[in-house]
Image: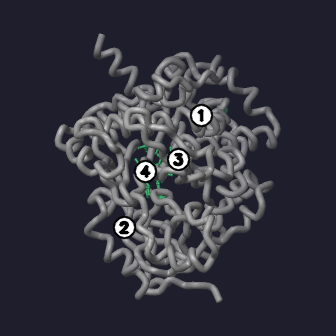
Amino acid sequence: MEVVLEGKDAVDWIYRGEGAANLVLGYTGSSPAFIGKIIRIQKAPRSRSQRMTGSPILSIHECLLWRDTNELGSSTSKEIVGQLFVLYVMSSFLGSEHVDAGIRILVSREFLESVEKNTLCQRPASRVQAARVNTLCDSALLVSDHSAFPHGKYRLHKFSPMVITSCVSILKEEPCISVEIKPKCGFLPCSKFIVEGNAIKRSVTRFRMHQVLKLHQGEISQVSEYDPLDLFSGSSNRVHDAIKALFTSPQNNFRVFLNGSLIFGGLGGGSDNTSNSISEALEDLIEGVIQADHGLRTSSFLQLVAETVFRSGVLNRLLGAQKLDMFDIEGAIHAYYNIVAQPCKVCRDFMDEELSHRYAPLHSISLEESLKIVRDYLIAATAKDCSLMISFRLREDGDPGPPDSTVYLEPTSQIFDYKAYFIDLDMKPLKKMVHYYELDQRIVSCYTQMLKTER
Ligand SMILES: O=P(O)(O)O[C@@H]1[C@@H](OP(=O)(O)O)[C@H](OP(=O)(O)O)[C@H](O)[C@H](OP(=O)(O)O)[C@H]1OP(=O)(O)O
Ligand SMILES: Nc1ncnc2c1ncn2[C@@H]1O[C@H](COP(=O)(O)OP(=O)(O)OP(=O)(O)O)[C@@H](O)[C@H]1O
Ligand SMILES: [Zn+2]
């Protein structure tokens, strides 16, 4: 019989974090089926009424777009769409060993109402204001908790099942420290469809330009020092620079968890800049994990993260998926209008006759070609917005374990096991293409405006 989470079960699920679309809860109970798992619950924007599941989730044009992907088109819940998209699309780019599509689990309305009530005081005010738990959903996604290691898994492999069963309850787990990095777009576009007026996009990253717009709109108080090109550079020094910059300006791009609890960075929104008192607190909190003197632990830890990002090569696959965006939104938007069979608003608004002619060939390609351009653009959009979670656990002396997932931290002579997983791999809605185009224009225009006033 299928398990349903009921109202009484809500006490075992505690707030972990949230993004714009989902609320994430960790498990504190004792059911073996849920230990080491989180659930991801849909939210509903307060500006819109909540949606009941049951009717098709994808629009007619989205069904066309994803028709070759197993059963995506006929899915009747967002969770199923999410699961299948991760399973059949994203994991083929990122590697199934770095992705957990999760399983769908039924939840009662009482469960969701209790969750909504219990988590209210922990959620950031801006997130509460924007959205609430969608209590009309009947399911959520159950996913591995990437901020924890599975319970003593391979350390117990040498013992018999009976010994393991009795050990698991008394074993004292090693502390697990994890980082969550939202790398954003790691390359500069070079599409021939970028108009001359936007040529700056070829030399300044989308992240840096977006920072200026966010500052202008009061969403952040300082621009970040982080440069995604460093993180994706494949050069050890530049990766170290990127991790240090993420620590200095965490915003929503960098968080640290100790045994699943957030110890650095902000929930939801994120904090702009790291003060001395925040750094001090982190030094103390990681004492049991990084065996270095006070004052040296954080830098050693950042070195551990940078080494792991660099050695694992996990970001190479992410970059490959991001680079599916070959046309840039300035090219892909025309293919979008082909698919939805509407007159292209971008060509309509070009003042320059010559420009409209330049994009005319994009309106005479086949439907198949348009579908491929937009499909690739949307997969890349997911890859530009997802996060990477890397968890570390100290390796005991003489512990064999898998050799390919360990990292040596030179300053402390410690060896850590690590695991790296991508999270938040949701499919982006087709209708967001228009928003992507408009936001891109706003970002470039704000940045070029800023350059002019600086001169
Ligand atoms: O457009 P961007 O680059 O601002 O990305 C959005 C993110 O903003 P960021 O700049 O990372 O703070 C935004 O993150 P926040 O809500 O700002 O933490 C979301 O991830 C959004 O995705 P979705 O609408 O939830 O599917 C993201 O939208 P997508 O562009 O990925 O669809
Ligand atoms: N499998 C996981 N293990 C541990 N923590 C997780 C996991 N999935 C999500 N989280 C935590 O929950 C937070 C919110 O999750 P997620 O990014 O999936 O939300 P979202 O609403 O889909 O995000 P977005 O704003 O990008 O749409 C993450 O930032 C992370 O801290
Ligand atoms: Zn057009």
Judging by the rendered image, the residue that carries numbered circle 2 is 15
Could you say which disc has been placed on residue 178 in the image?
4
Residue on which the image places disc 3: 386
Mark 2 vs mark 4, CA separation in Å: 17 Å
Q: Are marks 2 and 4 in contact (CB under 8 Å)?
A: no
- Which quadrant of the structure image shows residue 118? bottom left
> Between residues 94 and 330, which one lies in front from this camera angle?
94
Instruction: Find residue 109 and report its horizontal and vertical position in percent.
Output: 46, 83
Q: Is residue 26 left or right of residue 354?
A: left
Q: Residue furthest front?
A: 398
Separation of disc 3 and disc 4 at Cα?
A: 16 Å
The relative height of residue 193 versus residue 436 in the rendered view (above or below) is above
Which of discs 1 and 4 lies nearer the camera? The answer is 4
In this view, the mark in front (3 or 1): 3
Residues packed near mark 4 inside 10 Å, few (<14), some (14 to 19) or many (20 plus): many
Q: Percent position (x, y) of residue 146?
A: 50, 57
Marks 1/2: CA–CA distance? 36 Å
Look at mark 1 in the image and give the residue it sits on: 329
| SS type, badge 4 | strand
- Type of residue at label 1? Ile
Looking at marks 2 and 3 on the same chain, the residue that comes earlier in the sequence is marked by 2
* Ligand 2 closer than 8 Å to label 4 CB: yes
Dot 2 or dot 4: first in sequence order is 2
